[in-house]
Amino acid sequence: MAVKIVRQPKKIALIGACSSAAAFLAGTEKAPAALRAAGLAEKLKNAGFEVNDLGDCPPRLFADDDEHRRARNLPAIVAGLNDLRLHAEVAIKSGALVLVLGGDCAQVIGLLAGARRYHKHINLLWMDRDADLNTPASTPSGRIDGMVVAHIIGRGAPELVRFYSESPLVREPDVLLYGLERVDPPEAEFLAKSPVRHVDAADIQRKGAAASARNALAHLHTESREFVLHLDTDIIAQEEFAAVNVPGSGGLSFAEVRASLREMLSQQTLLGLDVAQYNPERDADGSCAQKLVALLVDALSARLQAPGTEPVAAAPAPPAQPDAAELPREEPAATDPAHSETAASETSASDLVEPEAEPAESEPSSPETSTPETLSSEPSSPESSET
C-alpha cells in the first residue's frame, strides 16, 4: 500500500550523526552535542518551528585502519549509515524537514537512503569547496570523506555503492556541486565528461550569492523535484570559520553562505539538510558553534517567510516496509588531513563498481557523451589543489 506523506514546512526533525569514521581527523563526532549545547533546538523553536528531536546515532569513530589503506573504516562507516537511515526513514515519513547534524560528510548517504525509501528520484545540492569525486583508485588518503559524491553516483567501494539497493543513489544529471574551489586533477577530468553540474566559488562571488543560488535551484528544477542539501562547513573561509578539519582561505564568506542558504532552504521541495565537518575540538571557546547555530536558525527561518508554509500533500510514496522504530538517544563520540590527495591506483579496476547512470528525465546521463556543465556565464575549469 502506498504511503501518502504530508509535508509539514514548519516542522523540523533533528538527528545527530555522531561520526568521524570517514573523516581526516577525530572530533567531528562531537559536533551534534556541541550544537545542541549551543541551543540549536531551543532557538529553532523560538523562531517558530516545531522541533522533533529524534536523538543521536551511536558514535562511529575515526581510525587509521592501515589494513584498508584505499578505503579506510568501511565497516564503521556502513554501520553508521544504517543507524542514520533508520532515523531518516522515520523523519521523512513524518513530513518534517530532516536536519542531520554531522559528523563526517559520508553521513549524507544515510539521509539519502532514508529519503529514497519514499521517493524514487532525489536531486542533490552539494555545498562544499571540495568536489569529493575521488575514488579508492584515485587518491592515496583512503579517507571516504573525499569520495562521498563519487559513491553517491555509483563509483567507488562496493560496500558504499551498493549500500542502497538501487545504484546510484542520485543520478549524475541530478547532482549540482556549489562553491567549488579545490578540485584535484582526476576530479577535474571526470567533471569534463560528466553531466554533474558545478559552479565555482569565484563565479558565485562575481554574480552574487543569492542570484547564484537561485540559478542553481532552477537547474535542479526544485520547483517540482525533491532534493537534499549537503553543507560542508569548510566552504566558509577559515578567517571566519576555522573549526573544521581542512580549513582554507578564500572560498565563500559567511555572508555569502548565509545568502545562498536562505534561498535554498526556502524551497518546499527540500527534504533534508545535513551539516558536516564542524569540529568542536578546534573550537575551544565554542564561538564557531554559536556562529553555526545562528547561521542555521537564520537561514531556516526563510522557510517560514516563503509562500506555501501550510502542510502540503506530497505524491503518494512507493510501498514501504514496516516502520523503523525510533532509536534511543546516545551520547556522541572521532577524522588525517589531506582531504583530496591524488596518486596512482593500487586498487584493480575489478574491485571498483561503476554502474552506468540511469537515463535522466530531460538531460543526458552518459558521462562518455556529455559535455561538462557549469552554471557560470563563462567556462570554468576547476583548479586542482590538495587539501
Image (spheres, rainbow, N blue to C red):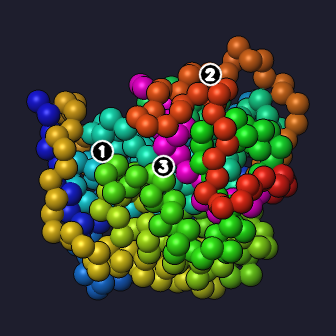
Q: Which residue is the site of mark 1?
A: 89
Q: Earlier in the sequence, mark 3 or mark 1?
A: 1
Q: Is residue 322 above or below residue 315?
A: above
Give the CA separation, mark 2 to mark 3: 21 Å
Does 166 lie within the magenta span? Answer: yes
Q: Which residues are magenta?
A: 165-182
Q: Is residue 145 visible?
A: no
Q: Which residue is identified by label 3?
A: 124
Question: What is the residue that sits farthest to the left in this orientation?
Answer: 1
Q: Residue at x 79, y 34 (%)?
A: 138
Q: Amino acid type of disc 2?
A: Val
Residue shown at 47% from the left, 83% from the top: 294
Q: Nearer the viewer, mark 3 or mark 1?
A: 3
In front of the other: label 1 or label 2?
2
Asked if one can make out residue 138 in the rendered structure from this viewpoint, the answer is yes
The residue depicted at 25 percent of the width and 81 percent of the height is 48
Above or below: residue 60 compared with residue 268: above
- For disc 3, the neighbor class at 10 Å (few under 14, some 14 to 19, many from 20) is many
In which quadrant of the rendered image does the N terminus lie?
top left
Q: Say left or right for 59 vs 253.
A: left
Query: What is the three-letter code of the residue carrying label 1?
Result: Glu
* Number of dots carrying numbers: 3
Secondary element at image label 1: helix
Query: Which residue lies most toward the front here?
Result: 377
Q: Residue furthest top?
A: 350
